Every structure is written in C-alpha cells, then in structure tokens.
Amino acid sequence: MTMLRIKVASFEFSARMEDMLAPQTCAKFLNLLPYRQNLIHARWSGEACWIPLGEFSLDVGYENPTSYPSPGEILFYPGGYSETEILFPYGATCFASKLGQLAGNHFLTIVQGREQLQEVGHLVLWQGAQDIVFERD
C-alpha cells in the first residue's frame, strides 16, 4: 500500500493510493512526485476544490470512476468532455462541469486528517487559491 502526504496551506493529510483499483493512474501520478499546484474552489461540483490541468495528460483511461466521491476521495479526470483536473472533495459532491456530470478516477483516499477537510474547503472558498503539495509519506 502506497501512502502519500498532502499539504494544503497549514493542513496536512495522509492518503492511501488506490493501487489495486486505479493502477495506471496511481503509477503515472507517482512519477510526478513531489507534485505542487494551486487548489481552487470547484465551480459546479458542490463541496469540492480542484486543480485545473488544462490539456495536461497522464495518458490513462477510466479506471475506478465515480461521479459521487465521498469527502477525501480524490479523483483524477483524464479529460474528454472538460479539461483534465484533480478533484478534492471536502463535503457533498457530484462531479460536474459546465457540460454536465462527469466521472473521475478515484485514485487517492485521505485516511488521516479527514476532520480537517471542511476547514480546507472553507479556506479555499473564502480566501482563494491555496498551495497544495503531494509527496511520498
């Protein structure tokens, strides 16, 4: 089981990679570590933040897809109907874009620090973009 540490502003989380359910997404994402980006609030998905990636590609298809991730179930959307992105749900979420409902690869699950997810979501909503870093635990 591969574990990652995720830092958002002053918050820290431990996350389990879903190696068995999304092996290609996990393997390709591991090659990017440490991965730094900006986390912004989602526009259409409800209580979630996202990392817009534009035309970036991990060159993976759909595996372990869902439209309704639980808080802390992080998705990678490989693109197609909307731009490539990483979705970071902190509450009730239905993954969507301006074109409608989407499904993304559930490849990471936060296992420690879940109680901080609402605070992170509210921080991003009210204070704007925050730095996010994914690294091996």
Image: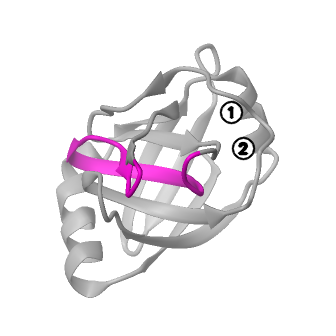
Residue at image point 81% right, 40% down: 59
Residue 128 vs residue 6, the one in the foreground: 128
Label 2 SS: helix
**Residue 11 position in % (x across, y down):** 35, 65
Q: Quadrant of the N terminus?
A: top right
Residue 71 appears anywhere in the view: yes
> Which residue ends up furthest to the top in the rendered image?
20
Where residue 122 sits, quadrant-wise, is bottom left
Predominant secondary structure in magenta? strand
Amino acid found under the numbered disc labelled 1: Cys
The answer to whether residue 104 is magenta is no
Q: Which residue is mark 2?
A: 29
Residue 116 appears anywhere in the view: no
Above or below for 17 versus 57:
above
Above or below for 46 versus 70:
below
Q: Which residue is mark 1?
A: 26
Q: Are marks 1 and 2 in contact (CB under 8 Å)?
A: yes
**Residue 121 position in % (x across, y down):** 25, 64
Give the magenta range. Answer: 81-99
Residue at image point 78% right, 39% down: 28
**Residue 89 position in % (x across, y down):** 32, 48
